[in-house]
Amino acid sequence: MGSRSLLAGAGQFMKKDGTLPSQTTDRLDTSTLAAADFDVDVRSGFLPPEQPLTRLPGPTFDVQNFEFSEPQPSLWECMLDWAKSIPLTFGSQYSDVAQSSAAQKWRSAIRAMPVASLSEAEMGHIRTMRRACVVLAFLSHFYMHAQIDVGQYETDPDKARSANQEAKRRIPWSNAYGLRDSAAYAEAHGEYVNKLPPGLAVPFVMVSERLGLPPVLTYATTVLWNWTLKDASKGLTSSNMEIKEMFTNSVSESHFFLTSLLIELQGVEALTLMRISLNEAFAVDKLAEQRITCYLEELANVIRKLTVLLSQMQDSCDPDTFYWDIRPWFKTGDATFTDSSAGRVPGWILEGASSERSLWTGPSAGQSTLIHALDLFLDVDHTRTKRQPNGVSSNRNDSDSTFMERMQLYMPSHHRAFLRHLQHGISTEPVCGPPKEDGADAEWSDHPIRALVLQCQWSGPNHPLVHAYDEALRALRALRDEHMRIAVQYIVHPSRRGPRNIKCSEEHEQKQTQKQTQKQKQNEDVVRGTGGTDLVNFLRACRKNTTDAMSHFT
Ligand code: HEM
């Protein structure tokens, strides 16, 4: 095989301080596959090695009495404490009048909340910024979805109108007691719907921009930065971690986020194996082949462990609770609508922070940098623009082939930079594989691991490295098989079953059931993921892309 010098530009990625490296090297610096430049740690991977801050510093505010003078970021913590103590419910569904009015008072307080901001010094502290982002993300979703349902979740104008009528009907006393100007009256008339007040919108946009995230709930704010150690003295181990912020404070929600967290932690080993394999790939000798074969076998084992962890989702996360009680809180501007002259338009209005409606999608573990890194390392092409092995020529017609690319926009900027580094730095000079038996064109690759696989294929299809590479891909496909099963169990089945155990009045329950039956009919064709994909077709396509990357399809 010819020399494997890296393409120029391999080092052109942003460093943590926002600068570019001063010089490019002629080989990939794989030490940075787990380096501080990309906020990736050898001990914790994409999770921060130190436990995330559990509270923003600052005074306690008497928020229930609207004590907002000299606002500081700790005000957001006080508002979150209050939200959790009520507790808030999706669509403000209460059978208890005291809770209902407490929730309404909380919403009024959010609207009255002045804009507090982090000081320059606080902006320099990554743990403070992340905690601020977590608190603001949870507060924003709490506020948007703890409002009365006045039809904001309906695309259809007729259904929106009837939801609106229902909302007005639910507070007849506001008219009777002459409360037309009251918050209750304004809320029932949809005055605040889809509008994030400045006290939340301004700091949320600012903090998110600094961290390179969109101003919505993400995988980073629900998983990566949303945990604490049960016992600080015992350090970072899987049995010593718990989830910090939740919407429902339920075992199911905690387990849902925790499963992803444990997968991230287990992924640390995968990052190490990827790094040492890439180092070896440059040696291009027998020893390198043998070592990479072992690393790929180990990587397959790690991926199998991720599959076991994923399958344990069902141990403590109930599918119906997930679908009906937890998942609605993840909705974002792409799934909420208001009337305008142009009809029902989607999007959240970030008051005082942006003139454009926010259309970002909700959190999905599709935003996990770890899984994207595995795909890149094993040369799984979700864009379907590359030439695939065995002569499969691809195009981008599969279900939402841009989803995985879009998901990178929801990753913290350093993790995105890490993937870019892996993607661009990974190219070698193209290597050609052996001629195909069926006469199809021989395959070329500039991907270091696949190039090595092609080279080994010259000595026969049963070369151990070729086998190990396919084995790792087979493990990744099995992970996707399990994931598909979980997605069907947690989204498709509950959506078809309809809601249960609604905790409010019987009348409301009947209405909800009718509504859901209608939705169910709409959903029969397409059930969508949190990220807005036609989930079954999309996940199938991801699995197929994994199979297509194999040297031998099996
Ligand atoms: C109840 C649990 C889960 C459900 C219902 C679920 C559902 C989904 C859905 C519907 C999608 C399609 C994209 C979208 O529209 O959101 C998706 C994508 C994805 N999810 Fe999950 N997911 C779950 C747990 C997890 C976990 C624990 C992980 C691992 C960290 C994970 C990793 C991924 C990845 C990497 C994608 C992108 C597609 C792919 O790479 O195959 N998911 N998930």
Image (cartoon, grey):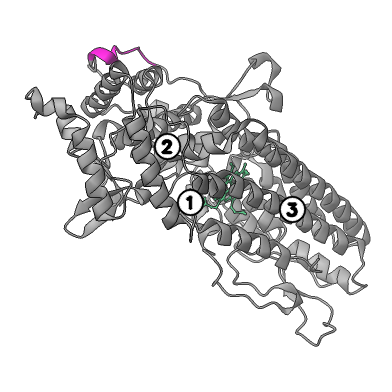
Nearest to N terminus: mark 3 or mark 1: 3
Q: Is residue 271 left or right of residue 21?
A: right
Nearest to N terminus: mark 2 or mark 3: 2
Q: Nearer the viewer, residue 533 or 54?
A: 533
Q: Nearer the viewer, residue 210 or 95?
A: 95
Who's the residue at 82% across and 71% down the image?
Answer: 454
Q: Is residue 360 visible?
A: no
> What residue is pinned by disc 2?
329
Instruction: Check if residue 186 falls in the magenta segment.
Output: no
Q: Is residue 507 left or right of residue 355?
A: right
Up-down relation of residue 425 to residue 414 (above or below): below
Up-down relation of residue 120 to residue 436 (above or below): above
Q: Nearer the viewer, residue 523 or 372?
A: 523
**Residue type beneath disc 3:** Ala
Tell me the number on the disc at residue 478: 3
Tell me the number on the disc at residue 531: 1
**Residue type beneath disc 2:** Trp
Q: CA distance from mark 2 to mark 3?
A: 30 Å
* Label 1 lies in ligand 1 vicinity (Cβ under 8 Å): yes
Q: Mark 2: few, some, or many residues within 10 Å (few <14, many ≥20)?
A: many
Please state the horizontal and vertical placement of residue 479, each as a whole percent of the image: 71, 50
Q: Which residues are magenta?
A: 58-65
Q: Nearer the viewer, residue 50 or 163?
A: 163
Name the quadrant containing residue 23.
bottom right
In the structure shown, which secondary structural element does the residue marked by tag 1 occupy?
loop
Please state the horizontal and vertical placement of residue 529, each as a whole percent of the image: 50, 51
Q: Is residue 128 visible?
A: yes
Please state the horizontal and vertical placement of residue 357, each as a whole percent of the image: 28, 50
In the structure shown, which secondary structural element does the residue marked by tag 3 occupy?
helix
